[in-house]
Amino acid sequence: MSSQQRIYQDEPTSAADHFVDQYRLDAHILQTSVTDLYQALDVDENQTVMVEILLSSTPKKYREQFLAKMRQAAQLKHPNIVEIYQVGMTSQARPYVAHEFVEGYTLQERMMQLLNHGVPTNSLYALQLVNLWPQFIN
């Protein structure tokens, strides 16, 4: 099955499923082992956000942990930390978090770029990139 043909476990099936509160789910970005990540539009604020929704198969204890950790993370305010706008539940009782959309590339994508250019991409180099990251963000 090609990546374009992949069917996601909890993919929206109706027009109503394309909304989570005031967030219109515009594009499915990624499915991990526990979440679906969507690029979305906050229709109240008219801004692009990211919405991460736990999969329906996630055990209840992890749902509670996710909600608690996201509520704690929402209290953090720092220019190098993605701002969390809202933590809640979908109409299907799946926990979600809506957070700031940051354009750019992931660390994994950066590592692949370096690998494609013949630059060593061992874990120590990755750690150096992570440590330098705040300098690039400011």
Image (cartoon, rainbow, N blue to C red):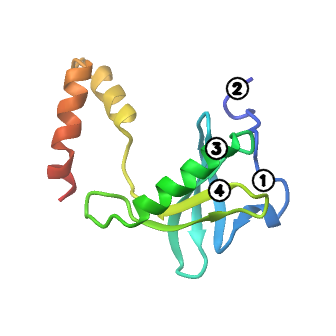
* Image quadrant assignment for residue 107: top left
Nearer the observer, disc 1 or disc 3? 3
- Label 4, label 1: how many angstroms apart (C-alpha)? 15 Å
* Image quadrant assignment for residue 130: top left
- Residue 4 placement, left or right of 122: right
Q: Quadrant of the N terminus?
A: top right
- Label 3, label 2: how many angstroms apart (C-alpha)? 33 Å
The residue indicated by pointer 1 is 12
* Sequence-first tag of 1 and 3: 1
Q: 10 Å neighbourhood of mark 4: few (<14), some, or many (≥20)? A: many
- Label 3, label 4: how many angstroms apart (C-alpha)? 12 Å
- Label 2, label 4: how many angstroms apart (C-alpha)? 29 Å
Q: Nearer the viewer, residue 102 or 1?
A: 102
At numbered mark 3, what does the secondary structure look like: helix, strand or loop? helix
Nearer the observer, disc 3 or disc 4? 3
Q: In this view, does 56 lie above or below 51?
A: above
Nearer the observer, disc 3 or disc 2? 3
Find residue 2 and name its label: 2
* Sequence-first tag of 3 and 2: 2
Find residue 95 and name its label: 4
* Sequence-first tag of 2 and 1: 2
Name the kind of residue labelled 2 in the image: Ser
Find residue 61 and name its label: 3
* Image quadrant assignment for residue 4: top right
